[in-house]
Image (cartoon, rainbow, N blue to C red):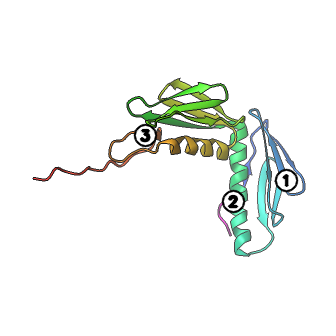
Amino acid sequence: MSRIGKRVLKVADGIEININNNHIVIKGKLGTLEYSYSPLIKVTYENGEIKTNRSNEEKTTKQLHGTTNAIINNMLIGVSNGYKKEIEIKGVGYKATLKGSEIEIIAGYSHPVTLSIPSSLKVELPKPTNIIISGIDKQVVGEFAAKLRDVRRPSPYSGKGIMYKDEIIRRKEGKTAAK
């Protein structure tokens, strides 16, 4: 049996759970999240605990079992604490600016790159080279952070680019001059 799938999820105080026809709605102090799961998975909520069970032992059902449990756990964390990703921009002249619901990044191209910020996210710029992305949906936060990073991935040779704050870039040695 799936170790993640059979995990019992504890629901904190102040979180409302509504399960109806393979659809779960979780409301917390930060907002509301919804998820429609497979009919092969049964989700039950009793005595402040959420349990997931599967209907058969097929491979795809086993995969859905653990995935459903993990997504519901991420939703519980999101509505109570939220998620946050920090991004650093390194390079001469590289910077970011907020313009309404868009972020403009100057990263060494002949033009600035503009990305629209999803409405469910909050983006802060404490410095022009630091970006803080926060929200309640783990997938949306991570996906937007990855889009920002893809504007100019960090170079292993120069170390310039857009990277996560805790990311370690393995540096490579460049070509050496012929003797």
- Is residue 3 in the magenta section? yes
Q: How far from the left and from the top, in percent, is residue 60?
A: 71, 71
Q: Amino acid at mark 3?
A: Gly
Between disc 2 and disc 3, the foreground one is: 3
Residue at horizontal 66 percent and vertical 60 percent from the top: 4
Q: Is residue 49 above or below residue 6?
A: above
Depth check, front residue: 146 or 24: 146
Q: Is residue 97 above or below residue 69?
A: above
Q: How far from the left and from the top, in percent, is residue 175?
A: 23, 51
| Labelled disc at residue 152 | none
Q: Residues within 10 Å of mark 3 (few under 14, many from 20)?
A: many
Query: Dividing the picture into quarters, in which one does residue 120 lie?
Result: top right
Q: Amino acid at mark 1?
A: His
Q: Chief secondary structure of the magenta span?
A: loop
Judge left or right: residue 174 versus residue 68.
left
Look at mark 1 in the image and give the residue it sits on.
23
Residue at horizontal 68 percent and vertical 47 percent from the top: 74
Per the rendered image, the range of residues in magenta is 1-6
Q: Is residue 65 above or below residue 30?
A: below
Residue situated furthest front in the rendering: 110
Depth check, front residue: 110 or 94: 110
Alpha-carbon distance for marks 1 and 3? 41 Å
- Is residue 20 in the magenta section? no
Mark 2 and mark 3 in contact? Answer it, CB < 8 Å. no
Alpha-carbon distance for marks 1 and 2? 15 Å
Judge left or right: residue 96 versus residue 135.
left
Q: Residues within 10 Å of mark 1 (few under 14, many from 20)?
A: some
| Labelled disc at residue 161 | 3
Q: Quadrant of the N terminus?
A: bottom right
Q: Which of marks 3 and 2 precedes in the sequence?
A: 2
Look at mark 2 in the image and give the residue it sits on.
67
Q: Which of marks 3 and 1 precedes in the sequence?
A: 1
